[in-house]
Image (cartoon, coloured by chain):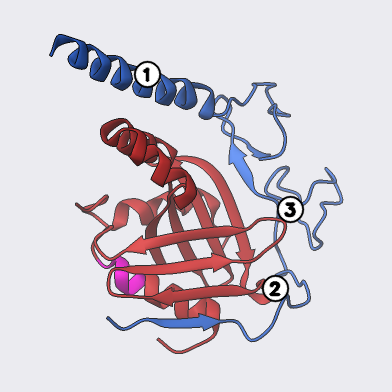
Amino acid sequence: MNSEKRETPSGVRPAAHAAGRACPFCATPAAAQFCGSCGRDTTAPRRPCGKCGRLVPSKESFCWSCGAAFKSDLRWKVPLIVFLFLLAFAISIGLALLK
Amino acid sequence: MARFKDPNIPAAAFGPYLEPGEQLRHWAYGVKQPNMLLMIPLFALAVLPGAIAVALLTKEYVVGLTDRRFIVLRFKGKNLDVQEVTDYPLNSLPEVKASTGGLFTHIKILDPAKPFVAKFHRMGMPGNREHGMAIEAALTGKQA
C-alpha cells in the first residue's frame, strides 16, 4: 500500500480575499473579512435555515431572518443510543435468565 | 457500497453556494467518524448498538474545490440536505495535512477557527479517489 503524506510548507498565510465577494448573510459586496453592512464574519461556518433557507452563522442558535430555532441532532441521537444499549442489556439479561 | 451512484448529484449541491463565475473543479464525498476512543467502548459494550451509534454519530461531507475556494458541505440524508457550509479561500489557506493510502484519502485542515478533518473512501462515489487525490494535491501544493 502506497501512502504519501503531504503538508503545506508552513502555517497560515496572510488573509486575502477575492474581489467581488459578497457577504453570504446579507449579500452586500464585502471585500473584508467582516461585512460592512451586517458586521458578521463572512468566512465563518454557516448553515441554511430549514424554515426560510437563508444562511445563518453556525454559532447563532436562532435564524436572524425568520426567528426559527436551530436544534442539534444530538437531542434525539443520544437518547436513542442510550435506549439501544439499555435494550441490548435487557435482552441479554432476559436470555441469561431463561437459560 | 457507493453513497452516490451519480457523481453529478453531489456536484449539484454546490450550486447555491458558488459565487458568480466560480467554477467547481473537483468534488468528493467523505465522512468523519467519532473518535476511536469512543468507538472502541461502544463496540465493546454491544456490537449491534455500537455499530448503530457509530453510524448515527458519523458526519457526512461533500467537499468541492473551485478556482477560488475549498468548500465543505456537511449534509444528511439521501437528498443531500445541507446542514453546514464552510469555505476556505485558496489564497489564504491554513495549514493542511493530507495523505492517500490504499483505500482512503485523508484531508485535515488545521484552522483554529474552523478545523476540518475527513476521510474519503475510493468507493464513496464514482471517481471519488481521483477527485480526492486532486483536491489533496491542490490543497498541499503538490502535483498529483
Which residue of the protein is positioned furthest toward the bottom in this rendering? B143
Q: Are marks 2 and 3 on the same chain?
A: no
- Where is residue A68 shown, x and y percent of the image? 64, 21
Q: Which residues are magenta?
A: B127-131
- Residue pointed to by mark 1: A86
Q: Amino acid at mark 3?
A: Thr
- Residue pointed to by mark 2: B92
Q: Amino acid at mark 2?
A: Ser
- Where is residue B2 shown, x and y percent of the image? 22, 53
Q: Residues within 10 Å of mark 2 (few under 14, many from 20)?
A: some
- Sequence-wise, the earlier of marks 1 and 3 is 3
Q: Amino acid at mark 1?
A: Leu
Separation (CA) of disc 2 from disc 3: 14 Å
Task: Output the letter for the chain in blue.
Answer: A
- Where is residue A41 shown, x and y percent of the image? 78, 51
Q: Find residue A63 and report its image quarter.
A: top right
Q: Residues within 10 Å of mark 3 (few under 14, many from 20)?
A: many
- Residue pointed to by mark 3: A42
Residue B36 located left or right of residue A98: right
